[in-house]
Image (tube, rainbow, N blue to C red):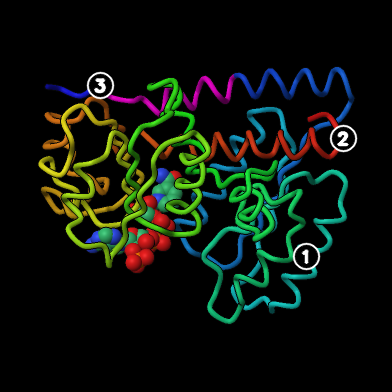
Amino acid sequence: MTAHLIDGKAFATALRERLTGEIASLKAAHGFTPGLAVVLVGEDPASQVYVRNKGRETLAAGMASFEFKKPAEISEAELLALVETLNRDPAVHGILVQLPLPGHIRTDRVLAAIDPAKDVDGFHVINAGLLATGGPGLVPCTPLGCQMLLRDYLGDLSGLEAVIVGRSNIVGKPMAQLLLGDNCTVTIAHSKSRDLPAICRRADILVAAVGRPEMIRGDWIKPGATVIDVGINRIPAAEGKTKLVGDVAFSEAVDVAGAITPVPGGVGPMTIACLLANTLTAARRSRGLD
Ligand code: NDP
């Protein structure tokens, strides 16, 4: 069997086009522009690339983009004051503080300071609680993108066995809540799980969010399963170069799975597209339009 490749890049492009149209309609009908504020602290090169891409895509979709670059030495109090200013700013509908933050700043304090209605990363405990209780919160972007890909490919997910490997607050746990909401039978595995291969083999839907290159082997996968590989790992390649691989051994999995997301080009492109979707949702809700 050769698995169907779930093309996250194409899906994300189509989603961005739809959002661009909706943003234009919102402007025409209601005269306001959704705005996303991104706060970057320090000089981390990967974070700088993410923030640049987020700003570029926000503008391309027709939204306003506000970037705040602060030195690594900024105090926690100063950062909290900036968040408070953005909370009060009516032109800002979404606030994203790029992680990780420098060690002297308490990340939980900063995330808790963001107005939950503007928390487009979906990391605030209020939004985590709303997701857990089926309420109308803002959902973390990466699992939201995975759910969109799964619904698009499989249609109704009711009754399917879903196994999620990884229990982080930003991927594994919200992914589990979303699939539970879609009536899957959900198992969350982690580093203390016993006999992980046997757990994975039960899965009709297998989501890998571990951060370990190619850990999930082909013979851990149930024939015909749908595999969502969230992992992004950079490993050494030929001629002193590096390459990106997922948490799933793709060349093995592709012979067993029914469908699989590639790395790159699978889940990754969905994350920023879902950030734009969340910003639009937050903007609409701020005007009572959702
Ligand atoms: P974390 O490091 O926060 O969590 C990793 C999880 O994997 C933990 O729950 C950990 O278990 C579990 N784990 C680690 N080792 C094993 C093991 N040997 N067996 C079983 N479980 C294990 O990572 P994230 O959730 O933030 O990210 C996961 C991956 O997804 C990374 O590769 C990251 O780069 C990628 N990612 C991709 C995004 C995208 O846009 N595509 C966005 C976000 C992340 P325990 O809790 O017991 O320690």
Q: Looking at the picture, which amino acid does disc 2 mark?
A: Arg
* Secondary structure beneath label 2: loop
* 90 horizontally vs 55: left or right: right
Label 1 CA crowd tier, 10 Å (few <14, some 14–19, many 20+): few
- Please say whether residue 8 is one of the residues in the magenta stretch: yes
State the separation of the CA atoms marked 3 and 1.
46 Å
x 45%, y 25%: residue = 151
* Secondary structure beneath label 1: helix
**Which is nearer the eye, 124 or 245?**
124
Question: Which of the four quarters of the rendered structure image does ligand 1 lie in?
Answer: bottom left
Query: Which label was assigned to residue 82?
Result: 1
Confirm or reject: label 3 Cβ below 8 Å from ligand 1.
no
Q: Judge whether 104 appears above or below 23 on screen.
A: below
In x, y percent, where is residue 290? 78, 30
Q: Residue furthest bottom?
A: 104
State the separation of the CA atoms marked 2 and 1.
23 Å
Q: Judge whether 202 appears above or below 77 on screen.
A: above
x 78%, y 18%: residue = 25
Residue at numbered disc 3: 4
> What segment is highlighted magenta in the picture?
4-17
